[in-house]
Structure formats: structure tokens, C-alpha cells
Amino acid sequence: MLDVGRHPNIELMAYTHVERGEGQSGDFTVTVRRKARYVEEDRCTGCGACAEKCPTVVSDAFNEGLGTRRAIYSWFAQGIPSTHTIDPDHCRQLNGKKCGVCKKTCQADAINFDQEDRVVELHVGAIIAATGYEVFDPSIIPEYQYKEIANVVTALEFERLLSASGPTGGHLDRPSDLAIEADIEALEKKAKRSQRALDKFEEKYDEASPEFYEKYQNGEYGHDEDRKKWASKYGAHMAIAEPLEALRRRAEGFAVAKRLAFIQCVGSRDFRFYPFCSSYCCMHSIKEAIIAHEHEPETTSTIFGMDIRAVGKGFEEYKVRGGNKSAITYVRGRVAEITEAPDHNPVIWYEDTCERRVKSQEFDMVVLATACAPGKGIKELTQVLGIKINEFGFLKTNPSQPLDTTRPGIFTCGCAYGPMDIPESVAQASGAAARVAQILSEFEMRKAS
Amino acid sequence: MNKEILVIGGGIAGIQSSLDLGEMGFKVHMVERLPSIGGKMAQLDKTFPTNDCAI
């Protein structure tokens, strides 16, 4: 990533959309829109002082909504370019309210609320469409209750929970526990505020609130207006403090997730959604189970799948090692339903096809190995570039020239082509680069002869 | 005839093809929809089968 930012031959345009593409192989004119970041790229040093001071808290898409960011943000800590961006949907200043805290904080004077989109025209000889994929949204599968049961997460959400730079710092805290901790934090803030109001009364009358309240209830103070206010404040404070105490007691019992279940083929190899195999999810689940076991050696994992497709160099050995050393059990069977037991534990109902019996098992957390779905913007891009998609929504290519799209001079690689893992994406990317170099040099040679 | 190239997408595939072409001496324009490049791979903690860090 860093190399791309530094390379003298690569011009990096992040936060940019492709709007129009015209021309032919060897001579394309592409119009791109560089969206306004409201931060000057040549000035921003990426120090992050603005994001520390920004008062607006927004759900963080990079962390799959498990953490929060501010309205001025960098996509992720090591992101290239490190230029911060203001989210125009949430920024107070850009929505007509008074703020501008980031502008006051920025020592590099990089904030520019008047920045506008810039439309740039590029003249290129060839195009590589490497637009990637989208994670399948499992909430449309009713039996897995992804939205209803907090501790059912997608593989990418689980990845962020495992990551040392993620919202939990690499601890496998369960989403249901995180939600309660967030409630505690919100209530603590409220309680602090109401305590401050009580402190003022206590100082004024030199009496502790609980004793005063008891006396007040007994009618010792009659109809004193000021004391009536105190009593109502105390009542409101107790309405916060009591549930807060109950939640705190519950939170004492929280532990990291140790019994994990992975469900394979969520949305893929399923005729209701995508009939194809997403190819990387079996290995992805095994990897996540191995890493979770590395973090916490007591962790046990069960992977439910129709079969484990460990096709690739060293993959089968990795799968076997996971079973032997990382406490992974592989169960051949498709999960029929997930229900919720007390304490937010998901219960998996499945048919063990080896024993031919319907069974159920309780876990701390369930991870859905979601399908590799075609990118959301890919249809629009194909219209802009005049290329075609196949029956699944990935870019259409010719089997004898697998990296060429339906239009000469436009190539593809990675998951825009179809589901694949990282090594395969990298190999294809080099292949696409070679194809581009080939056609551009052919033009050159023809011109010379 | 133009020897510049447009790469759409700054994930691992876009990054690799841009670097390859850049090394060959071609001028590359890389366009990414999000504020930073890295794509889905940047969201991964480690990668299989070597458990190497993704970033």
C-alpha cells in the first residue's frame, strides 16, 4: 500500500468515482469525479488532532459498524493516503450548525469547508477494472437470525473483533456484551450529570440526599419549593442509578467468547441466493478459528459445512493442523436454524450427516461465512465503460482470454472477475498488468514498422 | 496511442497491477472509491495459510 503512495509512476486518486468512459483500446477518455474531502490533501499531515476534537460520533464502516469514528476521520489508521476526510452527512459545520472545531485544531491549516468536487479528465490507453466484491448481507436468510441475535456475526465482523487494531483491541468480546457496556457508559454519563445537580443541593442544605429524601417523604419539609425540586432530582437520579447498578452486576460476569461456531456457505452454494462457491470462506473460517485459539488457548471451534474445500498450496495441511492443534471440530452438515438461549448464547440446530441425527449445540458466538457477492457499484461501472457482466453479476470474460472483458483494452482481475482468495487475486493482477503491457507495446511496434 | 493506464479499484488486485505496471515504466492512474486504498484485505487481521499480517 505504502509503495503505491510513493511510486513516482502511480498517481493515486482516492475518494474518487468514475463518471464517464469513451474511446477505444489505445485511446480512452475517462472522466472521474474527485469528491470533496473538505481537507486539503497537500497540507494534511494525517496527525489526527482534528478527529480527537471532533464532537460528532459516527458508526465506523471500516470496523463493520462495531466501533465508532468521528465526522472527520481517516478510513483506517494506516490508510494511504493518510489525508483525513470530512463526512458531509454528519459534519455539524457542513449541515449548517455552528462548529468548526477541526479547523481551529488543525495546525497545518488543511481544513477547507468550501472545497468542491473536482472533475478530472484522464487520457489512457488501457483500463483495468479491479473493483472487488461486496460481503453478502445475511439478514435476508430468516433461519440464521443475523439481525435478531446479537452474537451471530459475519466473518468480516469477526475479523475486526480479532484484530489488534479493531474496536476491541483483539479481545473476543461478544457483541451482546459490548452493547451492554455501551449502555453502562451512556447511563454513567447521565448519572454523573444528575449527581452534580444533587451535589449542589447537598452543599446548600448540608445534608446527604438519601437522608433528605427519607425526611421529605415523611413530610418533614412541608411544601418548600426548592426542596421539592431536590426531591424530584433525587428521584430521577435513582431511576438512572438503579438500572445502572443492575447492568454493572451483569457486566461482572462477562467473559470473552470461547465456544465458537462457524457456518459455511452462507448465501453461496444456495439456490435462493448465489449458486456458486465463494472459494475462500472455508480457509477463512479455519484461519479465524486458529487465530482465536492463538489469542485464547481455551477456545474451541466447530465448523459446520457441507464439505471443507481446502484447495490450494498448503491449504489441506493448514486445515489438518487446525484440527490437531487449534481445537477445531469439522462437522459435515448444513445448519437448519439458529435460536437464542438465555445469556444471549446462540444455539445451532443441525443435522449431523455422519450420524444421521438432528442435533443442537449452544455456543458463545456464531460466525457466518458470508458469500462473495458482486460489488454494488459494478452494474453502474459496466454501463459507464460499456462492458458486460455474467449471469452472477461479475464481469464477463472469455474463457480463452480470462482477463479480457467484453471490450478490447479493458481488463479485469481479482474479485471483480469472480470469487477468489488473496494469492489468486495477486497472480491475476500481475496477469492483467502483463496483458496491458502487451497490448500497449503492440501498438508501439505497429507504429514503428 | 496513449501509454497511460487507468486502474479502477485500490484493493489488493488493483494495488498489485498498478505496482507491476509502474515498475514496467508505465504511468498509472489509480482510482479508489473510498478515502484510502487497501480494500477488503486491509480489514483482515491475518491471512491464510501463513498467518501473515494483512497490512
Image: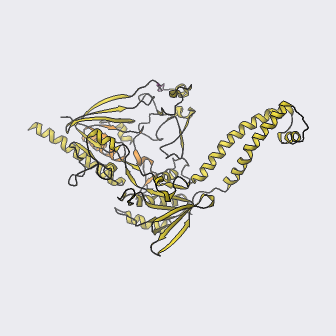
* Colour in which chain A is drawn: yellow
Q: Is residue A437 above or below residue A338?
A: above
The one nearer the camera, A377 or A57, is A377
What is the chief secondary structure element of the magenta stretch?
loop
Q: Is residue A277 above or below residue A83?
A: below
Q: Which residues are magenta?
A: A108-113
Residue furthest right as drawn? A220
On-image quarter of the C terminus of chain A: top left
Picture coordinates of residue A249 (x, y %)? 71, 53
* Colour-to-chain, orange: B
Picture coordinates of residue A32 (x, y %)? 32, 33
The one nearer the camera, B33 or A381, is A381
Left-right relation of A176 to A265: right
The one nearer the camera, A409 or A328, is A409
Q: Is residue A252 magenta?
A: no
Left-right relation of A16 to A336: left
Q: Is residue A335 above or below residue A42?
A: below
Left-right relation of A437 to A18: left
Picture coordinates of residue A427 (x, y %)? 30, 52
